[in-house]
Image (cartoon, rainbow, N blue to C red):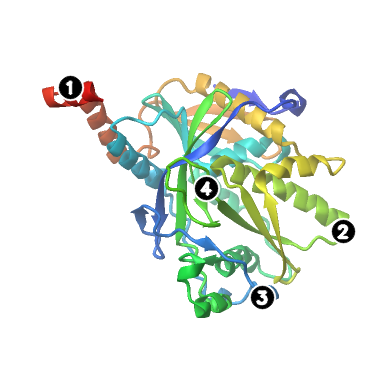
Amino acid sequence: MAAAFPIQPVARFAGKSELVKRPKEFACFSYDEDHKFHLGAQSLKWYYTPDLNVDLSKGFESFVKHDDSVDEHLDSLLTTIADYEQKTSKPIDAHIVTWRGMMTKIMAAPFDDDGFEMNATLYRGSIFIEENHAYKQESRANERPWNGPIPQEVMQYWGYKFETLSTLPRPWGETSREFIESRPDHVVNNKEQYCSVVRTGIGKTILCIGGEVDAIWDDKPRTQGDPINWVELKTSAVIQNDRQANNFERKLMKFWIQSFLLGVPKIIVGFRTQDGLLVGIKEFRTMDIPLMVKGNGRPKWDGDTCVNFASGFLEWLRQTITDEGVWRIKRRPRSAEIEVFKVEEVGHGHIITDEFMNWRIKLELRQAQPATEDEGAQQAQV
């Protein structure tokens, strides 16, 4: 039998925001240009202002596109967490471990009609949540045919092209003028990614979230956990009328949530014409966006409500998923509730890798062993 968390009435989540812990990066990983996994920051990019009046469709025919039809589960995130735990000799303390994309769907639910499905499992006191890949593939297959004047694949490419136009593989001082000026001609490859892994908290729930970061403004601080000047890059149509202004305000909700969850302080939006010509750039401070939207008179969403909804849902979820097995977190399109029910009675499906489980067993055995005399003497000195 499914348990259900009501989304409506949304008004009950209004009011002052629940406590939010600042996201702190404690680990990272990269995918290289072939989408091979690496621990560390080798795919980190630096922001550098792009030229305007560039055709965002340019180079589409040579686009090196990542095949996301393969279900990657939480594998890369778990490998990165295990590496961190090996260095610290203790497990992370998160109640929830997931990708940023899953938390974005949850936080947006009060003001968004989209459906979603996720798989979840309880392991060693933490709930691990991934996207239900089969649902994503089925939803794509059932999408209405696109009848616009520009192919949908080309329009999706525009965002990746903007990232290529706006980033450098090294800081500006280490990059040649020739490289910077030739960016409009560079091959676009979305297989390469830098992913940040952060510890954060919403209300009473501690989260470990992994997500892609587009670029950095300057450089990483020397002290781990200090704020990082990340930059999120987005594209949007030039605003020419009230309808387009309303659409942009709705897009700002997802922009804000995505950056809020990873502690990204700045969002840079490239504005383009209907046929994909980059004609303007505007910077938004993430923390200012909810107030900016409120000041528009009749806001389409409210940031405090998003936070309070997520806080309430996550606390309820932790009280609902209390034993092993695989659980489904499901929101039907336009539904007024999120359902949670068990789909497999035992095990963890493919959510938790064997390598991660073996590591956790090894860690528990290590923690259970009494300290040696040498270790005891070192601890006494500390």
Please tell me which of labels 4 and 1 falls first in the chain. Answer: 4
Q: Which residue is mark 4?
A: 228
* Front one among 232 and 342: 232
CA neighbours of label 1 inside 10 A, class few (<14), some (14 to 19), many (20+): few
- The earlier-in-sequence mark between 3 and 2 is 3
CB contact under 8 Å: marks 2 and 4: no
Q: Position of residue 159 (x, y in %)?
A: 61, 63
Give the distance between the C-alpha atoms of the residues marked 1 and 3, in whole angstroms: 65 Å
Disc 1 target residue? 376
| Of the image marks 1 and 3, the number of the one nearer the N terminus | 3
Three-letter amino acid code at disc 2?
Asn
Mark 3 and mark 2 in contact? Answer it, CB < 8 Å.
no
Assess disc 2: are there few (<14), some (14-19) or many (≥20) residues with their C-alpha within 10 Å of its C-alpha.
few
Residue type at tag 1: Gly
Badge 1 marks a residue whose secondary structure is helix
Q: Which residue is mark 3?
A: 55
Which comes before the other along the chain, label 2 or label 1?
2
Q: Is residue 314 above or below residue 45?
A: above
